[in-house]
Amino acid sequence: IQNHYLRLLMMYTNCAWLALWQIIMVGISLLGALQSEVWYSVALLDIIPQSRVMSFVLAAVGRNTSKILTTVVLLLMSLFYFSVISYKAWPDSYVLYDHEGCDSILECWLLHTNYGMLEAPSWNSSGYIVPDVDELNSSSAVLVRWYEISTKIGGTLFQFCYYLVINLVMGAIIAGVIIDTFSEMRQEAEKKEADIREKCFICSLDRDSFEQVGVVFSTHIAAEHNLWKYVWFKLYLEQKDPLTYTGPEHHAARLFKRKNDFVKLIPIKKALAINRAAGTVRETQDLTTVYSRVIDLCDMTMKVKDILNSRTQEQDEDSRHLRLLRKQNERLEQTVRRIEARYQAERRGSFLGESANPLNPSSPLNSP
């Protein structure tokens, strides 16, 4: 009962939050219509939960927030190091997105943060850094020459490293983290769909395990291990009075209440269909199965009875015909006997008549 009320409270809370969100959106829309159109920008947030793609993108970005934030911090640190180098070495010798030089390390760092991701620094002379020989204060031509060469090479390496680290690597890392998250989420979604499509939710056996023994997988998940039957059974136990539980129902309700013991009700990696096909199980039928089989037997019995009745009727018809033939035979025999008797009588009468005739010389009455 407590779980039932808790579930109702959760449903009411979800509905209340949804109604509150809709009321807030209506209020923001009214503010946009009556006060300022800027409020419509807030109302656009209602599109995100209604779009599956937008929700997927936000979930991908928010899933690896710690990695993205760590990469951003590393990017800001790298920009700071490059800002320090550029401020100390060439404060007024390069241009960054049409902004030339800086007066402090903080300004250099803000300049690199604002525009450093857009492009690498470029020198404000003829494509490469022009060394300031006056700062060297040396009359040695060799030293001046080495100073010019090292300055140009250092500026080129600085620009190359800046472009490689900031513009390529750091941006690629952030994009790679987001893209990898998209890929992981897509693989997880495909894995879930494949698991739902190719595995039984109850016993966790895959389709191949059933097809190898000649069991139709769709029939198994629809009839033998139907997920909704388990759900309906749980709801049935929750709505039924515990005082009217049967023995199995009391045992199942007790296991349902214990999360650790709930798995005992689930036939994990077990299926009677596979064992039945292998011939290693002796089934114990429930009342529904027994009733269905009794109905089948009754149907078969009625069919056999109909066949026997039809054969019995045929035999009765044959017996009737046989009796008729016997009666006809007896009548024929009687007719034959009557004919023979009449024939004998007529023959005897004709013989006596001939014997008593005086005109007949062969008669014994005319003998001397």
Image (cartoon, grey):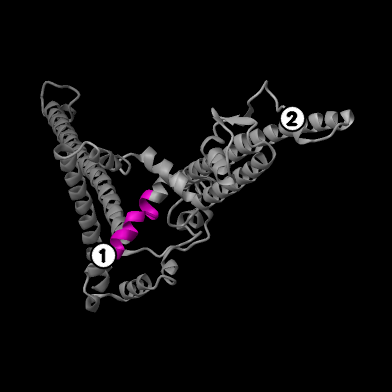
Q: Which residue is drawn at 41% across and 44% down?
A: 58
Question: Is 299 left or right of 285, judged from the image as shown?
Answer: left
Quarter holding the N terminus is bottom left
Quarter holding the C terminus is top left
Q: Can residue 216 be seen in this view?
A: no
Against 346, residue 277 (above or below) is below
Q: How crowded is mark 1: few (under 14 residues within 10 Å), some or many (20 or more)?
A: few
Residue mark closest to the camera, 2 vs 1: 2
Give the Cα distance between marks 2 and 1: 76 Å
Q: Nearer the viewer, residue 348 or 23?
A: 23
Q: Nearer the viewer, residue 188 or 140?
A: 140
Disc number placed over residue 108 in the picture, else none: none
Q: Where does the magenta region start and end?
A: 222-234
Residue at numbered disc 2:
131
Element type at mark 1: helix
Q: Position of residue 181 (x, y in %)?
A: 52, 44
Against 11, residue 172 (above or below) is above
Cβ–Cβ under 8 Å for marks 2 and 1: no
Q: Where is residue 129 in the image (x, y as percent from the top left)?
A: 70, 28
Q: How crowded is mark 2: few (under 14 residues within 10 Å), some or many (20 or more)?
A: some
Q: Main secondary structure of the magenta part?
A: helix
Q: Which residue is drawn at 13% across and 27% down?
A: 350
Disc number placed over residue 7 in the picture, else none: 1
Whether 318 is among the magenta residues is: no
The tally of labels here is: 2
Q: Position of residue 79 (x, y in %)?
A: 60, 43
Q: Nearer the viewer, residue 25 or 329?
A: 25
Residue located farthest toward the bottom when viewing the structure as drawn: 243
Element type at mark 2: loop
Q: Where is residue 240 in the image (x, y as percent from the top left)?
A: 22, 70
Amino acid at pointer 1: Arg
Amino acid at pointer 2: Pro
